[in-house]
Image (cartoon, rainbow, N blue to C red):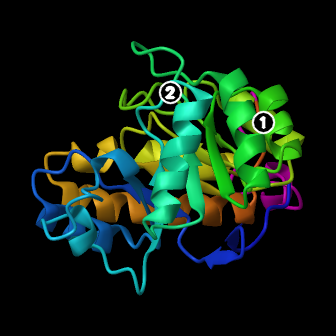
Amino acid sequence: MKRASELHIGHRTLISRLIVGTGKYATFQIMREAIEASGAQMVTVAVRRINLDRPHEESLLDFIDRSTITLLPNTAGCYTADDAIRTAALGREAGLSELVKLEVIGDPKTLFPDTEALLEATRILVKDGFVVMPYTNDDPIMAKKLEDAGAACVMPLAAPIGSGQGIVNPLNIRFILEAVSVPVIVDAGVGTASDAAVAMELGADGVLMNTAIAGAQDPLKMARAMRLAIEAGRLAFEAGRIPKKAYASASSPTEGLPTEAARI
């Protein structure tokens, strides 16, 4: 399937297809250096983690260069559509962005989304002028419903948030890519660089991650590794892989070469 050469989210055009989070870092300085190493042009921030009512206190926003990086507020920690809608509105009113990574969690153990509430919140926020980027399960039916509701992209999970399991069900990601025309950004579950490369080789338009970088023993090296993996995976997808075969196929074909008898 042919995907766009650049990543378009709303009216924004991104060259980097890696979106990173801002949580779980040991310090804000390490977070800033990891973002720089990743090459990401969009970073997601939890509205509830920002001291909106204490503007003079140090905040993670002080460590993000907003002249070059687009903020993506998220509704992490919301378990109802109403709560997610209020949180999105709070972020916009605080001047963060009209973008929102919409999360409506349905289960505290798996952190899987409540897709019914997610769809409801998407419809309401789109009507209210938000550019909605919903975190959803790897279901092509729901992905299509979210697109029809006006979502700017769909963000299916690769595996449970923070699990590091990689792309558990690549077939479903393929189905989603076939089902929708908006960008597909794989979100949650990436553990290492090869997971990111696999997502991009499948044809995903981008990958969003946080724990895989912030939780690594060396976040800066992992951030760079993820940057290279995203680029390599995208190039491999655009190049077109060879088909898989059951048997060997010689790298140096023998067709047209003289037979043994002819050489004697």
- Measured as percent of width and height from the top left, residue 30 is found at 14, 63
At a point 30% along the width and 60% down the height, the residue shown is: 223
Q: Secondary structure beneath disc 2?
A: loop
At a point 42% along the width and 27% down the height, the residue shown is: 165
At a point 37% along the width and 38% down the height, the residue shown is: 191
* Residue 14 in view of the camera: yes
* Residue 197 in view of the camera: no
N-terminal of the two: label 2 or label 1? 1
The residue under label 2 is: 159
Question: Is the residue 115 above or below the residue 260 in the image?
Answer: above
Q: Secondary structure beneath disc 1?
A: helix
The residue under label 1 is: 143
Q: CA distance from mark 2 to mark 1?
A: 16 Å
Query: Which span of residues is magenta-colored?
Result: 246-264
- Tell whether position 256 is magenta: yes
- Measured as percent of width and height from the top left, residue 63 is found at 22, 72
* 174 relative position to 80: left or right: right
Foreground of the two, 190 or 233: 190
Mark nearer the viewer, 2 or 1: 1
At a point 31% along the width and 65% down the height, the residue shown is: 224
The kind of residue tagged 1 is: Ala
* 152 relative position to 259: left or right: left
Question: Is the residue 157 above or below the residue 88 in the image?
Answer: above
Question: Is the residue 155 above or below the residue 166 in the image?
Answer: below
Foreground of the two, 134 or 78: 78
